């Protein structure tokens, strides 16, 4: 890991040439080249400017191996997610995620959802309303799993709660192979999102009928991925971001 490799990696993520980045930083292309080769260390003021451009924290830029993380995490993006209907269920147990996903997969098969909508999206999020005794004495936690269901789908098969998530803005990051080191990679994805929101002056937001955060796991070209969504303030600042990104 080096500061120069971090600068080079983040510049390429933003799709800047050295010339374009030099113009943003008000320096010469040669200066950028010397930064990236670790021949020269940028002044503190320049490092702060980089953090603003790259939407990262100074400590991460200077101390972490961002280039190595780049193979695991995508860049954070702001997305406007259209309103959707869902069927959900919550389980509190020592292994709630596996338990509730298995439950919902059986429900999807028995209800006919998989027959008419085989590409149905399964999402999930932590269920926070677990007592301290359940956690400390029995090692139990809560998790919610939900299928996004299409308009017009109806079933008499019971066992789920129906609700609707309103249109909302989310900060989104993608993790590659999240279960190789799940207790490191998944929490770190949330950390990266929160750092991004802080740098960009966005705010995490909780609102009725909008899931505050959720995860979507899927397989693509034989690789497992997970998208992590965190709801953000849908103010004018978000509208401006979406307009230019």
Image: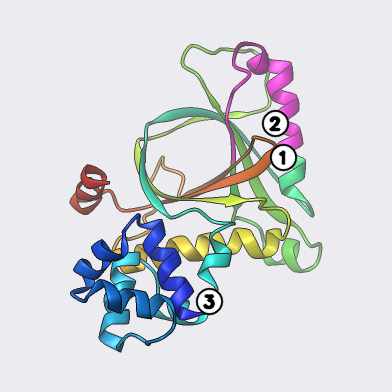
Q: Secondary structure at mark 1?
A: helix
Mark-to-mark CA distance, 1 and 2: 6 Å
Mark-to-mark CA distance, 3 and 1: 36 Å
Answer left or right for 226 relative to 11: right
Q: Which residues are magenta?
A: 101-123
Q: Is residue 62 visible?
A: yes
Q: Earlier in the sequence, mark 3 or mark 2?
A: 3
Q: Is residue 207 visible?
A: no
The residue that appears at 36% across and 80% down in the rendered structure is: 34
Between 97 and 62, the residue placed more toward the observer is 62
Q: Are marks 1 and 2 in contact (CB under 8 Å)?
A: yes
Main SS class of the magenta portion in the image = helix
The residue that appears at 66% across and 53% down in the rendered structure is: 178
In the picture of the structure, the residue carrying the numbered disc 3 is 64
Viewer-side label of 3, 1: 3
Q: Is residue 136 above or below residue 166?
A: below
The residue that appears at 63% across and 17% down in the rendered structure is: 113
The residue that appears at 30% across and 64% down in the rendered structure is: 200
Q: Quadrant of the N terminus?
A: bottom right
Name the disc covering residue 104, or none. 2
Name the disc covering residue 100, or none. 1
103 is within the stretch colored magenta:
yes
Q: Secondary structure at mark 2?
A: helix
């Amino acid at each position: 890991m080096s500061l120069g490799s971090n600068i080079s990696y983040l510049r390429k993520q933003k799709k800047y040439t050295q010339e374009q980045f030099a113009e943003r930083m008000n320096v010469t292309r040669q200066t950028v080249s010397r930064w990236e080769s670790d021949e020269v260390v940028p002044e503190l003021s320049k490092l702060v400017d980089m953090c603003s451009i790259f939407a990262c924290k100074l400590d991460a830029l200077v101390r972490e191996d961002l280039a190595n993380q780049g193979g695991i995490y995508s860049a954070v993006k702001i997305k406007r997610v259209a309103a959707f209907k869902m069927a959900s269920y919550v389980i509190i147990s020592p292994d709630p995620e596996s338990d509730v996903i298995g439950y919902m997969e059986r429900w999807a098969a028995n209800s006919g959802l998989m027959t008419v909508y085989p590409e149905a999206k399964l999402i999930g999020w932590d269920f926070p309303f677990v007592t301290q005794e359940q956690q400390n004495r029995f090692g139990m936690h809560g998790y919610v799993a939900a299928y996004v269901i299409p308009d017009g789908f109806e079933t008499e098969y019971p066992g789920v709660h129906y609700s609707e998530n309103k249109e909302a803005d989310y900060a989104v990051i993608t993790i590659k192979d999240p279960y190789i080191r799940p207790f490191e990679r998944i929490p770190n994805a949330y950390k990266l999102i929160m750092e991004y929101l802080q740098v960009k002056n966005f705010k995490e937001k909780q609102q009725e009928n909008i899931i505050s955060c959720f995860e979507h796991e899927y397989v693509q070209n034989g690789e497992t991925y997970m998208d992590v969504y965190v709801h953000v303030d849908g103010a004018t600042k978000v509208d401006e971001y979406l307009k230019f990104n």
